[in-house]
Amino acid sequence: MKQVKQLFGNCCGRINRRTFLADSGLGFTGLVLGSMLQRDGIARAATLANWAPPDGKPHFPPKAKSVIWIFMLGGVSHVETFDPKPALSKYGGKTIGETPYRGVLQSPLIKNHVNATMEERKLMQTLLPLQVGYRKHGQSGVEISDWFPHFAECVDDVAFIRSTWTTDNDHGAQLQFHTGRQFFQGFYPSVGSWVHYGLGTLNENLPQFVVLGPVPATNCGGSAAISGNYLGPEHNGVPLLVDPEHPLPFARPERAAYKGEQKDEFEFVQQLNQLDSVVYPNDSALRARIKSYELAFRMQATVPELFKFEEENAETRSMYGLEQEETKTFGQICLTARRLVEQGVRFVQVFHGGIGTENNGWDAHSELKENHTKLAARVDQPIAALLRDLKQRGMLDDTLVVWATEFGRSPGVEVRPNDATAKNGRDHHPFAFTTWMAGGGIKPGVVHGATDELGFHAVENRHYVTDIHATVLHQLGLDPRRLEVPGQKRLEIDFGAPIKEIIA
């Protein structure tokens, strides 16, 4: 305590009132002390002091208790994955104007809602044929790209939304997909943060919003895509490195012998934080930091257990592709996602690819066939394994799996006037793309929404990205309007609407 007391010192040779209260309040973790200071007028109430946050209970009976949100960074081609368009091959090499579908370029959907110029669109009017074959699969007969043979066996458990659209034509769409807003519109809470904020914990020893894989690059939204923003930093996603040898920088296996020393360090830091909470009782960042230290200490014992993949039987390890170099990394991530949900984590955010990674992830401006062939081979088996594993354990019933990407790819071939090396690729395409969901009370084996013959526009049952958010929250028993924070104005489009047609 001597080290702590020195931070405040004496007043005229005597212990001042604040220091006395701080010392006496440590045993009550600063909570009672904060109330005393406010009562005595030493600490002022926060502006929103009378506002009661959610009580951790669903607003209505939920159909899911956890979410695994799988997001492909860079922009996956919808026409070569889950919404194949044979017309692209039929008219490949021709301009859009030379096809029966020339009207797509005059659609008001281009002019009214998308951050893209007509000049950019005109450069990519020559249609690129499909770069892969496709077939119908399952009893539902859903057409799936040949790049996803493992996932194709799971289509009867999946609901496809082929009519998703967004408005950002660049990689800021990664931020938009997770928060509903573009960069210039300001920063808003991510969908994972809303879930964290709205529901209580199921496991005090793990974060309720965990992030696996590469977080979006700064120019694509960065940590804002997993941020609680005005909800407070305690609702941010917590990134975990899937590394059995070094699961956490503060919880390495070789330090296991020093648990007593770590406990002493933790308690001392807590004393410092609690003293700060006396001086700054309304500091949300400080409260979040105190909570994070407490959680970090508990995580030291819990997190390393998550990565003991040797505990899984040989069949499970093989199913996720852990024995193959090509699928091992993403297989471990998907298996960790299942283990996290099994331990009570509410929202697991999985990222794959990303700007700045090898070949910029799924951002196939050139050589799309090479890019998507390679990346699909890395994720197809692990994603299918996750769905099968959840189903065979009876967990798919109350675990909602979401697969998404920031936008689709253009029907026309990429053209770069100043770069002749760009060949056989597709540009960003926010006008239409596919998202899918499985489990958690979602209808299995259905296709909802549609694009035109070229895959240019979402034309039937169109859904802005916040409809995906609204559907997730609905399945968890949450009404986004009842989660509102005083002083934070949201637009109608920010709330979205649950996609009732795919809800069982």
Image (spheres, rainbow, N blue to C red):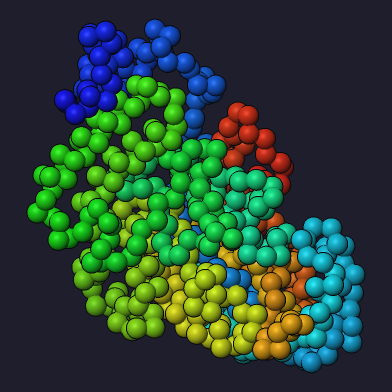
| In the rendered image, the vertical position of residue 55 relative to residue 472, given as above or below | above
| In the rendered image, the vertical position of residue 292 relative to residue 119, given as above or below | above
Position of the C terminus by quadrant: bottom right
Position of the N terminus by quadrant: top left
User: On the rendered structure, is 459 left or right of 364?
Assistant: right
Residue 135 placed where, x, y %? 60, 86
Between 444 and 375, the one nearer to me in the picture: 375
Between 414 and 430, the one nearer to me in the picture: 414
Which residue does the image show at 39% across and 32% down from the upper left? 287
Which residue does the image show at 84% across and 72% down from the upper left? 119
Which residue does the image show at 22% across and 9% down from the upper left? 13
Determine if residue 135 is in view: no
Residue 189 placed where, x, y %? 56, 45
How many labels, in total? Answer: 0
User: On the rendered structure, is 423 left or right of 19?
Assistant: right
Determine if residue 290 is in view: yes
User: On the rendered structure, is 420 left or right of 216?
Assistant: right
Looking at this view, name the residue that lies furthest to the front.
Answer: 12
| In the rendered image, the vertical position of residue 468 relative to residue 381, given as above or below | above
**Quarter occupied by residue 320:** bottom left
Residue 174 placed where, x, y %? 59, 60
Which residue does the image show at 50% across and 21% down from the upper left? 46
Residue 245 placed where, x, y %? 23, 66
| In the rendered image, the vertical position of residue 280 relative to residue 393, given as above or below | above
